Image (tube, helix red, strand yellow):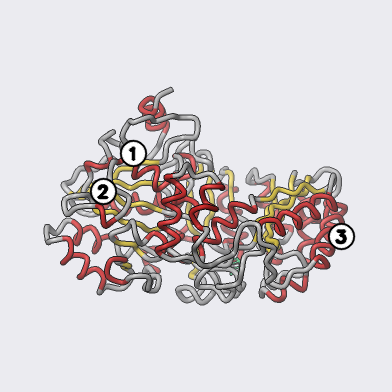
Amino acid sequence: MDESAIIDRRLAQEQGTLRGHGRRAVALVYPSPYPVGMASLGYQAVYGILNALPDTVAERAFLHDEDVQPGRAPLVTYESKRPVSDFSMIAFSVAYEIEMMGLFTCMNRMGVPALREERREHDPWIIMGGPLTFSNPVPLGPFADVIVMGESEGLLSTLVDAVFSGAPKHATLRALADKPGFYVPSIHGEWMPPVAAASDDLLPARSSIVTPESALKNMFLVETERGCSRGCTFCVMRRSTNGGMRVVPVERILATIPDAASRVGLVGAAVSDHPRIVQIINAIVDGGREIGLSSLRADRLTPEFVGGLVRGGYRTLTIASDAASERMRDEMQKRIREKHLLRAAELARDCGMQQLKNYMMIGVPGETDADLDELIAFSQRQAEIAGPRVRVSLGIAPFVAKRNTPLDGTRFVGVREAERRLDKLRDGLHPRVEVRPTSARWAWAEYQLAQGGFAAGLAALQAHRDGGAFAAWKRAFKHLEPVTTPSARVGT
Ligand code: SF4
């Protein structure tokens, strides 16, 4: 099927598509395929906000689907099938480091030079924003005219007014660079301004469109809180970011849910920390709707909480233990105890869950084989408690240090060492507990960008031009700092 037919099919299935009219046209590009972009609450919220601005229309475009070969066809928007390069303002939402590959592919298809210094005055404005700006957007610097830092709700009107003001680009950039929340790499260099915080009056973010082809099928998304009050030392959403957790009142959350929504996804950095989370779940489920939540803190779970989730069709209890042992969790200030994780297994069993997923990292600074041995023994015990009807799995990611966290600057454990630790876990846990790791190689690539600056962004572009395989990444990053090589057995 060609791309145009896919777009037609998807538009026909969507509820809530916005078809605005206005002289100020913005293309909103998600550098991953449609199912991923439509499951992003931030992307959906920005689409709604831009279309509500006076004389403004925002249209969506996505990285092509994996099974589609777009050839030389230009990237077009969904709403009008206009080429994205026809828009004066093109805004990318970037969630994580490796998504830069999708961004370069989209720019190739747009026919707009990726490098800012190769673009001319009449080329479209290239704006970037999204979750990556909370940690390290500096590698985006050689490609973006403006990067919107952090929570964009309160900044979008100012940005669109500036871009469409008709003033010369350099003067507009100068004016934006002096305003909080706007990172202008051509002026600020590698110094990134602090992230912006939106007014609490603008919360909660919510979906504009509900669609069966979202990764979160037919789910209306709404934010229950923003930020987090806790202090995990690896996390960019910890309490030092934008003043900690801002709770959205229950009534306001429930009032946003459209009558037609049959599935509701609650979104936030720390959804289970909402003081009235059980009441929210029960209100949604009692209204005959299914429910979805991102990962939960095990110390917040109760029979009422987990029972409500099961009534709402939830079958996989997903919790974050984050580190291999009690000692490591203490060092990372995770403040989850083994007893909470074991209690989660009991609740999964007693409430009728089918699966228990633990998310965690390996290779955190200070981790030793003794911590992994503890994880193996603990996971077997957890599986025993969960019983034969509950599948238990470990979703494991090699640790990557992020900017704006206390662990910033700590070194990557090394690809070979990460793989050795994963093999040890697989051997120790087979067959009762499934180990589902993310790639150690791509974690290394993520680390290069998470800790890098402009040079890392340029190296990523080179890797993309060389085909984007891991070997191309190794070549491109060979001479850059930080100097961890993919094969290094680097201690911490
Ligand atoms: S890991 Fe979770 S609980 Fe810890 S600071 Fe981040 S969002 Fe909060």
Counting other residues with Cα less than 10 Å from the Cα at mark 2, is it few (<14), some (14-19), or many (20 or more)? many
Instruction: Mark 3 or mark 2: name the one nearer the start of the chain.
Output: 2
What quarter of the picture does the C terminus occupy?
bottom right
Q: Which residue is drawn at 31% across and 34% down?
A: 74
Q: Provide residue 107's location: percent of width, then percent of height.
A: 34, 45
Which circle marks residue 478 in the picture? Answer: none
Q: Say which amino acid is labelled 1.
A: Arg
Q: Nearer the viewer, mark 2 or mark 1?
A: 1
Q: Can residue 256 be seen in this view?
A: no
Instruction: Mark 2 or mark 1: name the one nearer the start of the chain.
Output: 2
Q: Provide residue 3's location: percent of width, then percent of height.
A: 39, 28
Q: Say which amino acid is labelled 2.
A: Val
Q: Residue at x 39, y 74 (%)?
A: 194
Relative to 225, residue 28 above or below = above
Q: Nearer the viewer, mark 1 or mark 3?
A: 1
Asked if the residues shown at circle 3 and circle 2 are in contact, with their CB atoms under 8 angstroms apart, the answer is: no
Q: Mark 1 points at which residue?
A: 109
Q: Provide residue 150's location: percent of width, then percent of height.
A: 40, 65
Q: Which of 91 and 240 is in front in this view?
A: 91
Which circle marks residue 377 in the picture? Answer: 3
Q: Name the residue under label 2.
A: 26
Distance in Å between CA atoms under marks 1 and 3 = 50 Å
Q: Is residue 267 visible?
A: yes
Asked if the residues shown at circle 2 and circle 1 are in contact, with their CB atoms under 8 angstroms apart, the answer is: no
Q: In which quarter of the image is residue 53?
A: bottom left
Q: Provide residue 226's location: percent of width, then percent of height.
A: 49, 65
Distance in Å between CA atoms under marks 2 and 1 = 17 Å
Q: Say which amino acid is labelled 3.
A: Ala
Instruction: Mark 1 or mark 3: name the one nearer the start of the chain.
Output: 1
